[in-house]
Image (cartoon, rainbow, N blue to C red):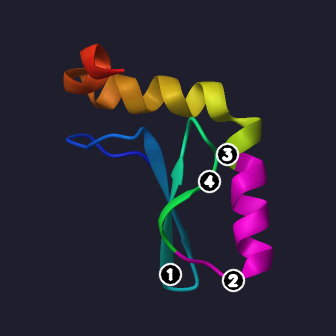
């Protein structure tokens, strides 16, 4: 999930079983939070598969950050 009014690094929020993790869209690693190993692996895989689209969405929602990248 992407939100407006965000901060760097570019990231997405992933929720699973009441837990949340932020995945960095550049490095494809965990920026904050935690998930169990299996859901985390799947989340990173899905983010990697859709990395370009998610980065586009992040920047569309957070135009204030475009000049900082």
Q: Determine the secondary structure under disc 3.
A: helix
Q: Which residues are magenta?
A: 34-46
SS for dot 1: strand
User: On the image, numbered disc 2 is attached to which residue?
Assistant: 36
**Residue at 35% from the left image edge and 23% from the top image edge:** 60
Q: Main secondary structure of the magenta part?
A: helix
Find out whether the residues at labels 2 and 1 contact each other: C-beta distance under 8 Å: yes
Tell whether label 2 touches label 4 (CB within 8 Å): no
- Point out which mark residue 47 bears: 3
Residues at discs 3 and 1 in contact (Cβ within 8 Å): no
Q: Please tell me the numbered disc located at residue 29.
A: 4
Using residue 53 as the reference point, say whether residue 1 is left or right of it: left
- Specify the label residue 19 is tagged with: 1
Q: Residue at x 25, y 21 (%)?
A: 63
Of the image marks 2 and 1, the number of the one nearer the N terminus: 1
What's the CA distance linking mark 2 and mark 1? 9 Å
């Amino acid at each position: 999930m992407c939100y407006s009014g965000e901060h760097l690094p570019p990231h997405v929020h992933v929720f699973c079983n009441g837990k949340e993790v932020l995945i960095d869209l550049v490095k494809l690693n965990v920026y904050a939070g935690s998930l169990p190993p299996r859901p985390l692996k799947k989340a990173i895989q899905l983010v990697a598969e859709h990395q370009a689209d998610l980065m586009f969405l992040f920047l569309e929602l957070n135009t204030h950050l475009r000049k900082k990248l």
